[in-house]
């Protein structure tokens, strides 16, 4: 059930060279690759022929689709991004 992507879901690969860091995109598994309950929307970036999600999944590019709006967010990705973007000064002492 391998489906050839009609279009590279990637964005400009030279973004890192321009000093903007790796481009972050929203992706989910293509329909039919996994069950519908696993087709949550991850924050991800490209690594060769795969995408690496914020929740540490490595998924082949051919198995994902890029999504702009909607979809159920991956809670692990959301939590990691929320923690990573929280100002350090507001964190309670540990
Ligand atoms: Zn995720």
Image: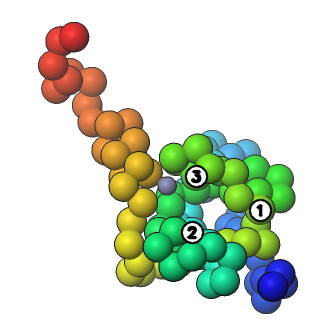
Q: State how far apart marks 3 and 1 are (Cα).
A: 11 Å
Q: State how far apart marks 1 and 2 are (Cα).
A: 11 Å
Q: Which residue is mark 3?
A: 53
Whether residue 37 is visible here, answered yes or no, is yes
Q: Which residue is mark 1?
A: 60
Q: Quadrant of the C terminus?
A: top left
Residue 19 vertical position relative to residue 15 in the rendered view, above or below: above
Under circle 3, the secondary element is strand
Residue 31 vertical position relative to residue 84 in the rendered view, above or below: below
Q: Which mark is residue 29?
A: none
Q: How is the image coloured?
A: rainbow
* Residue located 76% across and 66% down the image: 61
Q: Residues within 10 Å of mark 2 (few under 14, many from 20)?
A: many
Mark before the other along the chain sequence, 1 or 2 = 2
Q: Which mark is residue 27?
A: 2
* Residue located 40% across and 42% down the image: 80
80 on left or right of 10: left
- Ligand 1 contact, mark 3 (Cβ < 8 Å): yes
Badges 3 and 2: C-beta atoms under 8 Å apart?
yes
- Counting from the top left corner in percent of width and height, residue 7 is at 77, 84
Of 63 and 66, nearer the camera is 63
Q: Residues within 10 Å of mark 3 (few under 14, many from 20)?
A: many
Q: Name the outermost residue toward the bottom.
A: 6
């Amino acid at each position: 059930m391998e489906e050839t992507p009609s279009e590279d879901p990637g964005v400009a690969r030279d973004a890192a060279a321009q000093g903007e860091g790796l481009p972050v995109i929203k992706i989910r598994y293509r329909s039919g690759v996994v069950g519908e309950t696993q087709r949550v929307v991850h924050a991800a970036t490209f690594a060769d022929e795969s995408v690496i999600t914020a929740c540490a999944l490595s998924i082949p590019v051919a198995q994902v689709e890029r999504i702009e709006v909607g979809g159920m967010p991956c809670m692990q990705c959301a939590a990691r991004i929320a923690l990573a973007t929280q100002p350090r000064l507001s964190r309670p002492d540990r």
